[in-house]
Amino acid sequence: MTNLILPKDIDSKFRFIVVAAQRSKQIQSGAKARVETRSRKPTRIAMEEVLHNAVSWELRDENEAPQPAPETEV
């Protein structure tokens, strides 16, 4: 898997790795694989899921300020 052909919606290898890494963490925490694969390694499964568009993700605008948590009175 040294020469990856990335899906059209992924604009860079870095983004591919970030998305696959996040999905790998989910798999390690017990999430089930979304594609049939021979591999048992979470990282490899996550990479195959991203390549088969089985993982949904979105870009967030960097200029968008995070919403503050609502304050509660104690």
Image (tube, rainbow, N blue to C red):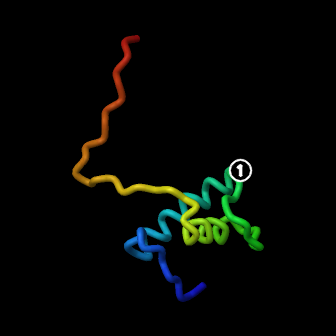
Q: Is residue 5 left or right of residue 70?
A: right
Q: Residue at x 31, y 36 (%)?
A: 67
Q: Height in image: 51 above or below 4?
A: above
Q: Nearer the viewer, residue 37 or 63?
A: 37
Tell which residue pokes out farthest to the top in this image: 74
Name the image quarter holding the C terminus.
top left
Place residue 71 in its image quadrant.
Answer: top left
Q: Which residue is mark 1?
A: 30
Q: Nearer the viewer, residue 43 or 4?
A: 4
Place residue 46 in its image quadrant.
Answer: bottom right
- Number of numbered tags placed on the structure image: 1
Q: Residue at x 67, y 67 (%)?
A: 45
Q: Give the percent coordinates (x, y) of residue 29.
A: 67, 51
Name the image quarter holding the N terminus.
bottom right
Q: Give the percent coordinates (x, y) of residue 5.
A: 50, 82
Tell which residue pokes out farthest to the left in this image: 63
Q: Residue at x 52, y 83 (%)?
A: 4
- Say few, some or many: other residues with alpha carbon within 10 Å of mark 1 (under 14 / 14 to 19 / 20 or more): few
Q: Is residue 22 left or right of residue 42?
A: left
Q: Secondary structure at mark 1?
A: loop
Q: Give the percent coordinates (x, y) of residue 54.
A: 58, 61
Q: Is residue 52 left or right of residue 28?
A: left
Q: Give the percent coordinates (x, y) of residue 2.
A: 56, 87
- The amino acid at mark 1 is Gly
Q: Residue at x 68, y 51 (%)?
A: 31
